[in-house]
Image (cartoon, grey):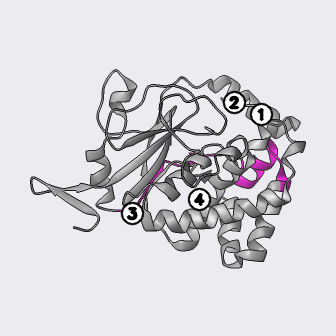
Amino acid sequence: MGYKNYINGKENMDIEIIVATHKPYKMPTDSMYVPLQVGAYGKKDIGFLRDNTGENISSLNPYFCELTGLFWAWKNLKADYIGLTHYRRHFRGSHSGENRFDRVLNKKEAEAILQMTDVILPKKRHYFIETIYSHYAHTHYERELIATRQILVENYPEYVPSWDKVMNRRSAHMFNMCIMKKDKLDSYCSFIFDVLDKLNQKVNVSEYDDFQARLFGRISELLLDVWIDHNHIQYKEVPVIYMERINWWKKGTSFIKAKFFGKKYEGSF
């Protein structure tokens, strides 16, 4: 019956959202969520599905982060809508509850949104005093941006205007979180994983510390908006709910050190 099944006369969409995790953690109970151990190659089984099965790039997890989970979902899941969230970050639903997991987007809410659009993204993060380009250059390494743009020039020249536009913005969709109709995911993943593979050939990650070596997961955050802009993708933004407290003081002081004193980020917050 196409991409929708019908139960009691109502549409029931085929949606699977992987929850990327590297450790045992509480998971949403809604059936559309699929807990996935990312970076599972050579690691102890923690009781979830593993990203080193089927067609995979699990061994690249120290550099690609949750993207090894996205790649696994792209190549191995057959659902009509596929998504990615994190064990510490989820799309927030409209319902309330004292427990944060009670507030995670559920299937009924996702279906209502996907009736209107093929893509769900997190609300943009705003960098009020910096562009996306300058923020990345201050907190990580500008040479990665230069190399990525050159890859686009050589292989995807039609994307270069969108890259330049996104780099000059002061907001972006971050975290690599998304829910997409399968044909959109095919287009998106084909693009980003080809660009990242070429970037991997240009960057010597052995020169980086463990944190900065995760650059491919960060560059992909930027490429998402480039793909969105170039292809004129319609989407709906949904707020993000954090399952743990964020150290905003440490985050803010690290940002100031990066911008004004050239101190690169040394870890997540």
Residue range (magenta): 117-143
The part of the image, by quadrant, that contains residue 90 is top left
Label 2, label 1: how many angstroms apart (C-alpha)?
6 Å
| Badge 3 or badge 1: first in the primary sequence | 3
Crowding at dot 4, Cα within 10 Å, few <14 / some 14-19 / many 20+, comes out as many
Label 3, label 1: how many angstroms apart (C-alpha)?
38 Å
Single out the mark in the foreground, 3 or 1.
3
Label 1, label 4: how many angstroms apart (C-alpha)?
26 Å
Label pair 2/1, CB-CB below 8 angstroms: yes
- Work out whether residue 261 or residue 84 is closer to the camera in this orientation and state it: 84
Q: Where does label 4 land, which residue? A: 224
Label pair 3/1, CB-CB below 8 angstroms: no
Crowding at dot 3, Cα within 10 Å, few <14 / some 14-19 / many 20+, comes out as some
| Badge 4 or badge 3: first in the primary sequence | 3
Label 2, label 3: how many angstroms apart (C-alpha)?
35 Å
Q: Secondary structure at mark 4?
A: helix
Q: Secondary structure at mark 2?
A: helix
Q: Where does label 1 land, which residue? A: 256
